[in-house]
Amino acid sequence: MSTRVLLPLPVVLPLLTAGLSIVLARYQRLQRLLSVLVLTSVVVIAGLLLHTADTSGPAVVQLGGWVAPIGISLVADRLSALLLLVSATVLLAVLLYAIGQGVADGRRSPLAVFHPCYLVLAAGISMAFLTGDLFNLFVAFEVMLVASYVLITLDGGAAQVRAGMTYVVVSLLASVLFVTAIGLVYAATGTVNMADAAERLQDVPDGVRLVLGLVLLVVFGIKAAVFPLFSWLPDSYPTAPSPVTAVFAGLLTKVGVYAILRTQTLLFPDSEVISQVLLVLAVLTMVVGILGALVQDDLKRLLSFTIVSHIGYMLLGLGLASKAGLAGAILYTVHHIVVQTTLFLVAGLVERRGGTSSLRLSGGLQHVAPLLAVLYLLPALSLAGIPPLSGFLAKLGLLQAGVADGGVLAMVAVAAAVATSLLTLYAVGRAWSEVFWGPVADVVADPDRSDSVDVGTARTPRLMVGAAALAVVGGLAITVVAGPLYGLSARAADDLVTPSRYVEAVLR
Amino acid sequence: MTGNLTLALLTGLLYTVGTYLLLQRTLTRVVIGLGLLGHGANLLLLQAGGPPGRAPFSGAAGTAGDGVADPLPQAMVLTAIVITFGVSAFLLALAYRSWVLTGDDEVQDDVEDARIARQRPDRHAHAHPEELS
């Protein structure tokens, strides 16, 4: 049996189960079991797809049997399959964490909605990674976003509605721009199949192509929280329940980054202007993001700003437009998905245990919960890029690629990357000393707390800690398998710099 | 490619009005603005399908191929309309929830902005009185 048959399953399975899950809303145990089973099978399928993509080239399925430029193609090349595997694993870990939290907090009404929405989110993310069609990518984004709208406003409190409003309006604006971009691409090329468009765009005048590239960059830049378009992120993420924030932090922005990687390398290769723009944006995103993180008092807000800042590293790799740069960007994306999710999971635990996520009010948590201190420290150091953790290896790859490029802008970006790395260490270190060191703080209710979900219960269920520990171990595992993983990233990057392989696989 | 000036102008108008309404502070206007922007985008997509005025699918002339309108943008616009419809419904529910919670139809102040404003009492004589306390 060819693994091509498996290709639609990461999308179809979660969607079907989401429907089943709504029907089974009364049987919460069954709901949980189903969600875990489905996401586990998606992990296995993604692993098989990655193996196939790595050994025998991209797997392609034409949905409904329609030939390529007419029907919708699903494509799993190395980049898609790798990100699919990582995201499915992260989704599973966060699901376990959420189940642990849900079980501990007893029967809550939103939980019945949580599982179906979470599965729809998983389906949307998988579809975004697998699709080879621009309009289908729009649909995938919408599937993912609609689920995320529900998840981010799960509690329906004033803070969630205020944050959710910003999030929904900004996402909706991005969607409108996306439809506009699709309309423009269709007008210019007469196709929305990405492989077909890649060929036809070569005949389009340079100016038009540049505009199309920039419009798509703006669209995905909003989703990925790139410099001038990031301000919605730190406002909306921290108010959601911790597992939701964790999965958004790890995955949603990275789907945007993936879309930028895919469209810019496939549709608009060798565009000097866009590369330069990307490098400038990378520098600004890194620096502005981390400066924002430095002044935050809330742990979750601080971490939200580090997401923004570290998106810059991925843009840096893409902006270099070299094989090494792209390989670094891919490795960095994998590392960042895992580490950022872990940090938010641990932040959720800190908030539960310490009663607040405010740095000012908390303190001395290492005396109360030493395990939590270790769980925070490892991913935090990895984020800052301390050797031998995964962040160091990913950053090293990017910096070497930057130095090899040798251009003025590339060198500036390398300098900014190093400075951002140091400032990240300062930011997460400050959070560490405020939260874990010092005298034990009394658990006082935070006067203007944003998260009413799980604050101050002081109970940290084993499943939650276990899931967070699993994520930390996953982050450490990246270090262990860094050699083969970098090899895989380099091969994926090689695919990206020769878009003809993708086009060949889809169209012929 | 020949275009239709009326449609082009209408698209531009929808984008303009939509953007203007989106920048207002009242949530109702924001929702309407997004709806108009969505219509503008859909019209743009429709125009990408080729010169207007042809019958959908099969033309009146009966000549194969020549008189056929491109069905793909129409299918895509339909999908986009359905999605916009669903999301608008959610957005309206959210706006209503916001109105129930705050008794106000305005977009709430940014948390950080409010915090910074509180730290600088000397600089905001024009702010609301309750924020001064």
Image: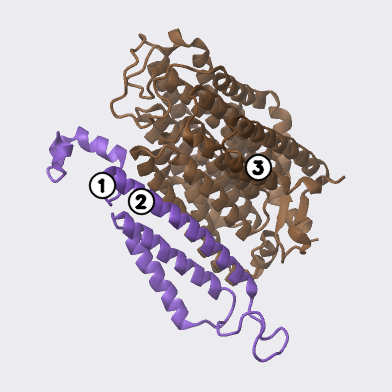
Chain colours: A brown, B purple
Quadrant placement of the N terminus of chain B:
bottom right
Horizontally, residue A57 falls left or right of residue A173, namely: right
Task: Say what secondary structure mark 1 lies in.
Answer: loop
Q: Is residue A245 above or below residue A345?
A: below
Rendered residue at 70%/32% (across/down): A485
Whether the residues at callouts 2 and 1 have beta carbons within 8 Å, the answer is no
Residue A422 locus on image (x, y percent): 46, 27
Q: In terms of depth relative to the viewer, which is nearer, A279 or B6?
A: B6
Quadrant placement of the C terminus of chain B:
top left
Amino acid of disc 3? Thr
Rendered residue at 35%/43% (across/down): A162
Task: Say what secondary structure mark 3 lies in.
Answer: helix
Residue A112 locus on image (x, y percent): 53, 37
Chain ID, mark 3: A
- Name, please, the residue furthest toward the bottom: B61
Which residue matches tag 3? Answer: A17
Which residue matches tag 1? Answer: B103
Which residue matches tag 2? Answer: B95
Q: In terms of depth relative to the viewer, which is nearer, A298 or B103?
A: B103
Q: Earlier in the sequence, mark 2 or mark 1?
A: 2
How many C-alpha atoms fall within 10 Å of the one at disc 3: few (<14), some, or many (≥20)? many
Rendered residue at 13%/37% (across/down): B122
Q: CA distance from mark 1 to mark 3?
A: 39 Å
Task: Say what secondary structure mark 2 lies in.
Answer: helix
